[in-house]
Image (cartoon, rainbow, N blue to C red):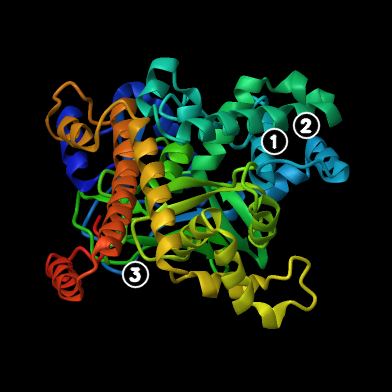
Amino acid sequence: MSASYETKECTADRNKISADGKIPPSQDKFTVFQRWLQNNGAKFSKLELRDYGDEVRGCHATRPLEEDEILIEIPLKCLITVEMGQETNVGQKILSSNIELDAPKHIFLMVFMLLDMKNPASFFRPYYDILPPTLSNMPIFWKSHELAYLEGSFLLTQIEERKEAIEADYHAICNIAPEFGRLATLDEFKWARMCVCSRNFGLIINGLRTAALVPYADMLNHYRPRETKWQFDHHLQGFTIVSMQSIGSGMQVYDSYGQKCNHRFLLNYGFSVETNVEPDGFCPNEVPVLLQLSNSDPLYDLKCSLFRKESFLPSKRIRVCVAENENFHTLLTFLRIIVADQDDIDQITHHSSRNFAGSKSGISESRIGRNMHSALNEANETRAMRLLEATMKQYLAAYPDTYESDCDRLANDKHLAPFSNERHAIIQVKGEKVVLNFLLEFAQTVLHFLSIRDPDLYRDELHNLQDKGKLQCEI
């Protein structure tokens, strides 16, 4: 999979930059690469590679394409699989050592690639030669001034965690296979980690669930809703990409990397999607909200027993998006527990009394969620919404710029390069602010209704919200 994102509109702009979009003469390595694939039985004549510069490439239709056409067929012999990495000496040592690794399937693909790349006569040499020598669009390689674009975002913590996990994996492998450290540096290991992360396909090959690097197929850029589908075809004994609709001649042909929050796109692929919305209007962008008990709370131990049922001890980040979902209900449930007084706790335990037997805390795991999906009482709900309001204000205040400022820059800043790390960072934090502002407005709306004592006024206000569509989640 390509580590870059192109919308259909952006593709037209890119073609203007690169004239006819053909691979320039200086890129003979792509010609060698394609000839290598064809000589080994690969078929992709319905597509052509186009190089847009800055390590951005894509595939375009060479003629009108119909629905259900096989666009790419890559034989099994041209795939790099997890099992190939496991069969190496280093891979065997990893398997026998039982060391814990951050992403084991990725590790075995990386091990094979890093070892095999040292062989000038490697069968996969033409493929290795077309891989980007740097991955400067990947946040783990961003410079300090680029990381500053993400100020206020929890993604900064995730980037550091990814760096630490990669380094820990490298040293763990070197400890059990010292020869690996002599063949591959930490920087090479980081590069391979992100190459594999952004390009591997999860497949079932001859009944075995695995992952693989698939030359040429990883050139397709991301677009939703998906226009193509891929699989390992057991009859053809090769990886295929098949069209799901008609595609015009010269149009870019896309793959879908799945329905994901922008933080996953940016961290794993090096891009953010400006309009990350599904056809049904759902936006998968999320924000991790920290739920945390105070150890000064006199009910701390009892609340910990409630949190324990969901592995919240004594805190947890829960990802919430702008939609009705289980995480949103869980957020409300544990806000209510955090602000609960003794009467509230008694109310919770009373409803769960039939499930005391056999429960260490005296509280039923299954019934807590059901009981707490609705407000306990007005006082508890008021405290919960005030906590949510204060938390959202705190989160929003951590960003140096507002949502409105982000929108203005993305729309009007001519100095903001279309595919720059800065632009992708702004898209990321803007999406986070949409979620945070929604949760802030939700808390304030609930608090407003809780303050209304006149039933007629309450009904009128409710109808007013319904008329404005405010009771539905907006993206």
Kind of residue at badge 1? Val
| Left or right for 387, reference 458 | right
Look at the picture and state if 236 lies above or below 164: below
> Can you say which quadrant of the picture contains the N terminus?
top left
Q: Are marks 2 and 1 in contact (CB under 8 Å)?
A: yes
Q: Circle 2 sits in a helix, a strand or a loop, which is it?
A: helix
> Residue 180: which numbered mark, if any?
none
| Tag 3 residue | 68
Residue 277: x and y, percent? 28, 56
- Distance between mark 3 and mark 2 Cα atoms: 44 Å
Task: Give the crowd class for mark 2: few <14, some 14-19, many >=20 residues within 10 Å.
Answer: many
Q: Which residue is mark 1?
A: 111
Q: Which residue is mark 2?
A: 173
Please tell me which of labels 3 and 2 falls first in the chain.
3
Decide which of 326, 452 is in the foreground and name it.
452
How far from the left and from the top, in percent, is residue 115? 70, 30
Q: Picture coordinates of residue 178 (x, y %)? A: 83, 24
